[in-house]
Amino acid sequence: MADIRIIDYKAGNAPSVMHAVDHLGCEAAFARTAGDLSGASHIILPGVGSARATMKSLAQMGMTEALTEAVLRKKTLFLGICVGMQILFEHSEEGNTHCLGWLAGKVVKFDAAKVRVPQMGWNRVWFAENVFGKVPDDCFYFVNSYHAKPKDRADIWGTASYGAEFTAAIHRDNIYATQFHVEKSGEAGLGLLKRFLDLRTGGQ
C-alpha cells in the first residue's frame, strides 16, 4: 500500500496537490518535518514561487538532508512539480540560487526578447518512453519564467516549445518531475499523477 507524503512548505502548493490525490481516491499526508518523511513510499514536492524561497523553506524545516536521504539513498519514489523540479538541479539563475544538485544542470530564464515571461497557460508536451510506458502527448498547464537545462539529455522525459524547445519533464531512476502543474492540468495531469502513485519502488 502506498504511503504518500506531500511536502507542505511556505512557497508550495500542497493543498491543491492533496486535492488532486484525494480526487484519485488515494490517501496522503502532509510532511512538515523531516520525521514526516519516515516510511514514505512516495514523496511529492509541489512548487509555487521562487527557487530561493523554496530552498530557504526546506532548510528552515530541516527537510534538505532528509529529502536527500529518502530519495537518493533509500530510493523513495519522488515527484517534483514546477519549482519542485527546478531545485533538483545544481543552480538556478533565479536569485542566483544553489539548489539540491541531485541532477547535473542549471535553470535559466526564458528570453524575454523572444517570448512573454512568464509562460502562463496550456502547452503541449511530447514524452519519451520510460517505466510509465508511452505517456500520450497532451497539453498541460504551465506557469514559469525559468526552465531547466539538464547536462545529461537522458534525464529529459518530456519537452515542450516556447520560443524554442525546453525541458518540460525529467526522469532518472526513482526521480520524476514536471515543469507543468499536474494538479492544474485536468484529466491529462491527473492521469500522469495516477501513473506516479501506482508505481512501486524500482518501477514495479
Image (cartoon, rainbow, N blue to C red):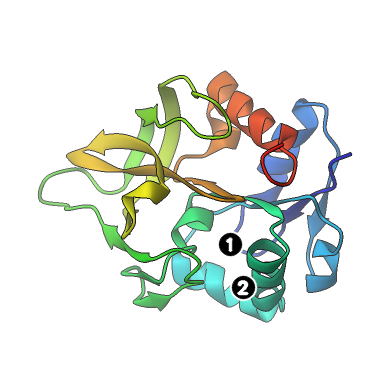
Q: Which residue is mark 2?
A: 57
Residue at x 37% of width, y 29% of height: 125
User: Where is 58 relative to 135, above or below?
Assistant: below
Q: Is residue 99 left or right of residue 147?
A: right
Q: Is residue 176 left or right of residue 35?
A: left
Q: Is residue 64 left or right of residue 83?
A: right
Indicate the secondary structure of the residue bearing disc 2.
helix
Residue at x 57% of width, y 34% of height: 131
Are the residues tagged 2 and 1 within 8 Å (C-beta)?
yes
- Relative image position of residue 127 (x, y in whole percent): 41, 30
User: Where is 123 relative to 33, above or below?
Assistant: above
- Relative image position of residue 132 (x, y in whole percent): 58, 30
Q: Name which quarter of the figure residue 107 lies in.
A: bottom left
Q: Which residue is mark 1?
A: 11
Residue at x 17% of width, y 52% of height: 112
Q: Residues within 10 Å of mark 2 (few under 14, many from 20)?
A: some
* Earlier residue among tags 2 and 1: 1
* Quadrant where the image shows the N terminus: top right
Q: Nearer the viewer, residue 154 or 37?
A: 154
Q: Nearer the viewer, residue 171 or 123?
A: 171
